[in-house]
Amino acid sequence: MKQKEIRIGMIGYQFMGKAHSHAYRDLPFFFNTKIKPVQKAIAGRNESAVKEAAEKMGWESYETDWRRLVERDDIDVIDIVTPNHTHAEIAIAAAEAGKHIITEKPLALTLEEAHQMYEAVQKNGVTHMICHNYRFAPAVQFTKKLIEAGRLGRIYHFRANYLQDFIMDPQFPLVWRLKKEVSGTGALGDIGAHSIDLARFLVGEFKEVVSIMETFIKERPMGEMSSGLQAKSNNSTLGEVTVDDAALFLAKFENGALGTFEATRFAGGNRNKNKFEINGEKGSVRWDMENMNNLEVYFANDEPGLQGFRLINCTEEIHPYAGAYWPSGHIIGYEHTFIHLVHEFLNGIANNYQPEPNFKDGLKNQQVLKAVEESAELKQWVNIAEQ
Amino acid sequence: MKQKEIRIGMIGYQFMGKAHSHAYRDLPFFFNTKIKPVQKAIAGRNESAVKEAAEKMGWESYETDWRRLVERDDIDVIDIVTPNHTHAEIAIAAAEAGKHIITEKPLALTLEEAHQMYEAVQKNGVTHMICHNYRFAPAVQFTKKLIEAGRLGRIYHFRANYLQDFIMDPQFPLVWRLKKEVSGTGALGDIGAHSIDLARFLVGEFKEVVSIMETFIKERPMGEMSSGLQAKSNNSTLGEVTVDDAALFLAKFENGALGTFEATRFAGGNRNKNKFEINGEKGSVRWDMENMNNLEVYFANDEPGLQGFRLINCTEEIHPYAGAYWPSGHIIGYEHTFIHLVHEFLNGIANNYQPEPNFKDGLKNQQVLKAVEESAELKQWVNIAEQ
Amino acid sequence: MKQKEIRIGMIGYQFMGKAHSHAYRDLPFFFNTKIKPVQKAIAGRNESAVKEAAEKMGWESYETDWRRLVERDDIDVIDIVTPNHTHAEIAIAAAEAGKHIITEKPLALTLEEAHQMYEAVQKNGVTHMICHNYRFAPAVQFTKKLIEAGRLGRIYHFRANYLQDFIMDPQFPLVWRLKKEVSGTGALGDIGAHSIDLARFLVGEFKEVVSIMETFIKERPMGEMSSGLQAKSNNSTLGEVTVDDAALFLAKFENGALGTFEATRFAGGNRNKNKFEINGEKGSVRWDMENMNNLEVYFANDEPGLQGFRLINCTEEIHPYAGAYWPSGHIIGYEHTFIHLVHEFLNGIANNYQPEPNFKDGLKNQQVLKAVEESAELKQWVNIAEQ
Amino acid sequence: MKQKEIRIGMIGYQFMGKAHSHAYRDLPFFFNTKIKPVQKAIAGRNESAVKEAAEKMGWESYETDWRRLVERDDIDVIDIVTPNHTHAEIAIAAAEAGKHIITEKPLALTLEEAHQMYEAVQKNGVTHMICHNYRFAPAVQFTKKLIEAGRLGRIYHFRANYLQDFIMDPQFPLVWRLKKEVSGTGALGDIGAHSIDLARFLVGEFKEVVSIMETFIKERPMGEMSSGLQAKSNNSTLGEVTVDDAALFLAKFENGALGTFEATRFAGGNRNKNKFEINGEKGSVRWDMENMNNLEVYFANDEPGLQGFRLINCTEEIHPYAGAYWPSGHIIGYEHTFIHLVHEFLNGIANNYQPEPNFKDGLKNQQVLKAVEESAELKQWVNIAEQ
């Protein structure tokens, strides 16, 4: 079997850079695709850091200016894992250079940028993807199949919580994720965006939303950390937190379903509890990323007395992607969602179809994000179509 | 030990009538109180039915007109377990007759009625209570103690779901609970009111709310059933459902906490899932009525590596009310919440204090209910204080 | 409806006395039987204590000598809730006096006594029952129905743990349950006997066993406590613990199934974890008394991809006994198992059939207990039939 | 940083071959070790199959005769992932050739072979390891730390179940795992050996055992399958199953703890339920491989009313190995246990220490296996030291 090589250039190398790098490395091992991702180069401003990252994560070369990476002829794909405020400029440049693009979420800092990005990829005819990796958990993909097969019937409720607690300590510093000019929003765009994507994937388009956004700790010690996710600051100078600690919203979907959403970084004891429940006419499902291999499924037409949520370990050959790994009952983890996402992206490039979720999904997601923000500011319902 | 007798007259005898009757019967067995409730009489319009109910549930006599019951000299307490639209008239008459009053929730059909009821009990100096029984689960009482002791710190989030599924079948008939003129509201007042009470008990007063109320099945077969909770109708005539199937709302509390609420009868697989989560500065709790003896508690200051939700079986001597029953690990059930509630009520009467939750709580609850309704109608935020 | 009165005399009034008394009191409320249990009298040696117990638990009169109770003409049933070493003498006297008998488990102190007791009830033609109450949890009764309907197919495995922790503190005193001359055995007869009964009920008769019995804490402070289940002793004199703290055994059943049993009072964190799992050719079940309303059921022929344990809340009309209580999803507790047991016992008396589990079951259970004891002493397999 | 290369040659390439290959590939990505495993060559008899496996799993070359692999100068390590009956011959040859050795479990077909293998590695001074990968789950390693720190106190009970269901269908064919001459034993050596290893790791050495071994399905269709783990056979010729479907045993440990073990392939609904519970004087733990990131921990000295099992997601920096991966709450899976195991092995080679578990552990494990087998045959207790 002759493999087609697809050469990747990645910009950024923190948490998401690690997840993406690993996915490229691991993909060919588990999935017998005809495509071989080549980790060609990464870019970062700090030379010693980017060099070390390249070595550690298996990249052949590095650049200290992302523009150089975009210009390189030996790169087919630009992978964007930088903070949110840089997505638009990079993506547009990459599209104009004819590169396929995969980017972290949220798509952009603002809806306007998102529109520009989507236009750019459309105009230049490149393949594009946005990294809503949770779609790619086997249990979530299996849920999609159940819904498409009509097994849940008409959907009444979608109920999503994305709960974290890593910034609850008031001494946690003012990292980039807590600054509006870099992140756009806080919990909303960082984790709520994932819940929005899951809702769009499983239920359909949003019609309107009403929200609360709150910042519980208004000021924090200045100071950045490499990982952005841990430790305390010793800096005694305080700076203003300009994004939300929590975002709650209610939603109506176009198909009549109702949604309840809560994204917060102030839910103690929940390290990364990304969960949802769906209640439909014929059945319900429950899922929780912290036990991501499990799916709970209820069918209203199960025989009387034997109705109850089934706890399904989605590690069987029949469950999407699971057959590539281990025998039933041997679980996979967080990183595998990225393998599946990258698998879909590269397949799209190789086989000339536009995979999902892509920039269009990112754009629609951003419309919801903007509506949620606007609703919180105006204290009123906001229609998505008007964004 | 000389016991003081308190003579009860109950109006109505369905589901709640059964729960209350049992509580009076069982209370003296478990709690060595100085008070002995005497099940003096019940009232109902259908003589053969009320007679049978009296026999079955241990009432000494019966009346076919509730006014007669209220007038009787040998009755100290009027217990109201009739549909919502009758609460006000009965309660006001009972108060004027100098009877102590215990009523099912919601307090009234409208906020105006609720105000009148509260005035009546105040003016006549009788003891009053409203049956928000879930407060009285040992795990919930224990949560209250944790909060009062400052163990959770400042509260950030209260997240409540009350999920049922008993009317999902479109052939389920148009029972009184589905008619606005009898019930006031649907899921909101029937089950959402319980979540509101739990929130007020554990977090504090509501400041403002924004909501969605939805009726998924707009028409149903006519026909009433005795229990009001089960079976299908064969009636082919359809009538309009005039209450909500589901009510979702976001809330801000006066102390700055945020609330997410969902009350629905369309959540398949959830027979009576009344659950809540609280996230505070120092800890979190989770509780679910379907496993009501269990409480999950997380403390942020547990030692590193050993932080996690503790699954506590609240059946130990130290847990409120639990010591009256069985050794640790031997669980109690739904009906016991009523025993505790009645215990508190009768203690209040005997010892001359006004127990909680009472008509004032019912009134405040009704303010929230009205605000939620208004918010759904007007599609805007509604302030509780303005109700 | 005319009710038949059955007049009860109970001997003993501790933990089990409370459970039985409550069952008599509560039975008529929930179950519309034609039988009305009358709590006629209780017996105990300490007059002030027995008098107080009678008042508290609703008995009309008391005796300070159990023989007097057995002789009374106004008593139909003798209920034995005394320590194990007294069961035989009382039961035989009661049988000879023509009383129906219900006794706590284990049936007797020794197998020989058990034989004598069974002979006595047979000879005198009285109705008899032994209080293996856990059989009467709706989830367990429902499991029985599934098995009888062939839904699990051939049974391969029965796996039972009965785990407690109330005597782990070495300062816990040398109560009667820890003395061989009073109790016969420790964890084995007290809790292991329940697992044996569940196995006999659900799987069938035992063929042979091999066991370990261990006493981890060999000496304890002298001193008795009223409840026998809690607190520490201040007594500095130590006495020898003469029963097992833990009993583990493997079993072969006559039908070829294999059993794994573990009864221990040294499993920290397990207050009363009485659980079992059954694996059959076509399905499996799991049950745990601490969440006794739940039953987990797996069917091998569920459709591929959707196979998993269903979490069933056995509170629906269709589940045995559950229909007598509350709507689906409203749980019951430990005490209700006694209501069902007493219901079955009194039905047997009124309708002239011999209910189960009865003295024959107690006798067979005792054979297993003896075989387990003998196996531990001899360190070899012991055949039940040879007991 | 200069990395030391360690060149691996692997013999066999089925399920375990895949797990090991992936571990070599993934190790350098997550762990910044100074060692770089080089996947030099694999060996297998079927040339086309071994060639394909080499390509798919990233091996530089292949051999069709394992002896050739052992002789190669460019190989430092021999990794044995072949069926059990071949381990001894290969390992001894490899030891004599001066190769470091890592082998799948159980160590050998017989105890005699195990002794020879251990002698061979000792005599030749090579580093050796046996793949009891479950030790290397972060939650298990963390349990070890808790025990070593005295947090559980004296251990009373170890309770292990390893439950599978993949051969329950009588049409599942007679694969090598079901033949005594190839596998030695069935459930016992395949999965029970893992429970034995966990017990030795966490509790200590076994003293004596008593067991049952059973073959529920005595004959099966002939026919082998590549994966050995799935599908049905169409072959109508039946062959005898010569190993156990289930092995149950009780154990006494040298330190006085008691063990209950059950390994079965006939526990429907349990795909790979490898679980254990430990009860100690001061605390208890519970773990289950199907949710391997979670650990439940109970401490007896937690404050009254707040005692309960804590559900700990062992994905924090503080949990062994977890820091190499993702932020807290982002789970890892089955394959990561092999990465940790290989990490430990290669570290041992590079830093000149003998890692654990090694051939000595394999030998001791085999002693227990043999004692269990003998106990089942003789129907009596068997002392480990006499093996």
Image (cartoon, coloured by chain):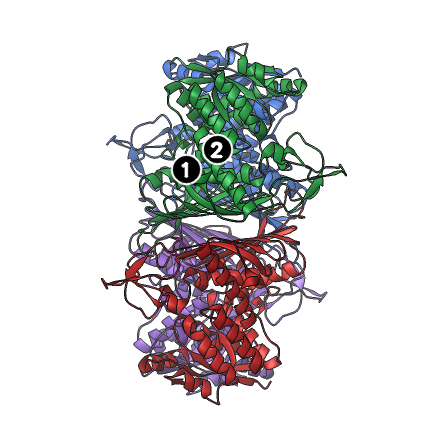
Chain colours: A red, B green, C blue, D purple
- Provide the major secondary structure of the magenta segment: loop
Give the side of residue B244 with respect to residue C240, left or right.
right
Q: Is residue A323 above or below residue D262?
A: below
Please name the amino acid that badge 2 sits on: His
User: Mark 2 or mark 1, which is nearer the start of the sequence?
Assistant: 2
Q: What residue is drawn where x is 39% and y is 25%?
A: B354
Q: Is residue A267 magenta?
A: yes
Q: Residue furthest bottom?
A: A73
Q: Is residue B291 above or below residue D119?
A: above
Task: Tell me whether circle 1 and circle 2 mark residues in contact (CB < 8 Å).
Answer: yes
Chain name for mark 2: B
Residue B206 x %, y %: 42, 42
Q: Is residue D325 visible?
A: no
Give the side of residue A212 with respect to residue A346, left or right.
left
Q: Secondary structure at mark 2?
A: loop
Disc 1 versus disc 2: distance between alpha carbons?
Answer: 10 Å
Q: Is residue A291 above or below residue A41?
A: above
**Mark 1 lies on residue:** B201
Please name the amino acid that badge 1 sits on: Phe
Give the side of residue C263 with respect to residue A217, left or right.
right
Region rendered in magenta: A265-270
**Mark 2 lies on residue:** B132
Q: Residue furthest right?
A: B236
Residue A276 x %, y %: 52, 55
